[in-house]
Amino acid sequence: MSFKFSLTDDDGVLVVSTVRQMEFWKDHDFGYEFPEEVIRQMREGRAVAWQCDGEDECDLELCFSRAQPVSEKSRLGPFRLKVLEGDQFVIMPYSQFTFAADCASGEVEDIDGLSFKTPIEAGIHHVYITITGEAEWLLNVVPEDGTPLLDFGDALPFYR
């Protein structure tokens, strides 16, 4: 199953999470330390984020599959994302992530061009990110398969 959509990336960072993982922010204060806060969320499997070095509209393709994508040198990942029962996958620019976490109790607004949501089955998933062109990204989401996670240290992943 795959989806193609565009988002307006207004700060050069895109974030993947789930609706249920964003509910974490109902009971927790959001820290605006960048990139430390989003890295903490990545380590806990609540979010995946990367620097895409653009502040413009970007085109994304989201593919859910059962098999790991073919290895490419322009691919980042895998990153772990924990998906809860009855959850939805959500992708948004960092500005929408911070707004939802700090001002909206974790609720990601359905704003065309600023977020994309779709149902996803519960479990641990690996997210792979591939640049496919100028401001174009492919996200492969597969069930966890034992592949070692990308060690991103204390820096937000980005393409060189």
Image: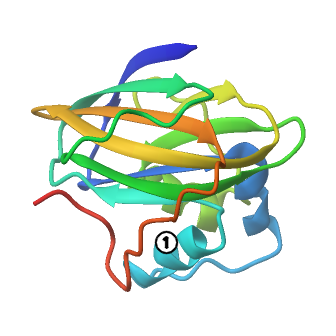
> Could you tell me which quadrant the N terminus lies in?
top right
Q: Residue at x 51, y 15 (%)?
A: 2
Task: Decide: is 78 above or below 156.
Answer: above
| Quadrant position of residue 142 | top right
Residue 63: horizontal and vertical position, in percent? 49, 24
SS class of the residue under badge 1? Answer: helix
Q: Residue at x 56, y 31 (%)?
A: 67
Query: Count of labels shown?
Result: 1
Q: Residues within 10 Å of mark 1 (few under 14, many from 20)?
A: many
In the displayed image of the protein, which residue is found farthest to the right?
Answer: 85
Q: Residue at x 66, y 49 (%)?
A: 144
**Horizontal relation, residue 114 to residue 64: left or right:** left
> Could you tell me which quadrant the C terminus lies in?
bottom left
| Quadrant position of residue 69 | top left
User: Quick one: 141 or 116, which is closer to the camera?
Assistant: 141
Residue occupied by mark 1: 38
Task: Decide: is 151 above or below 18.
Answer: below
State the scheme by which the image is colored.
rainbow
Q: Residue at x 19, y 48 (%)?
A: 73
Residue 133: horizontal and vertical position, in percent? 13, 30
Report the amino acid beneath label 1.
Answer: Val
Residue 58: horizontal and vertical position, in percent? 24, 31
User: Quick one: 60 or 27, which is closer to the camera?
Assistant: 60
Task: Decide: is 122 above or below 110.
Answer: below
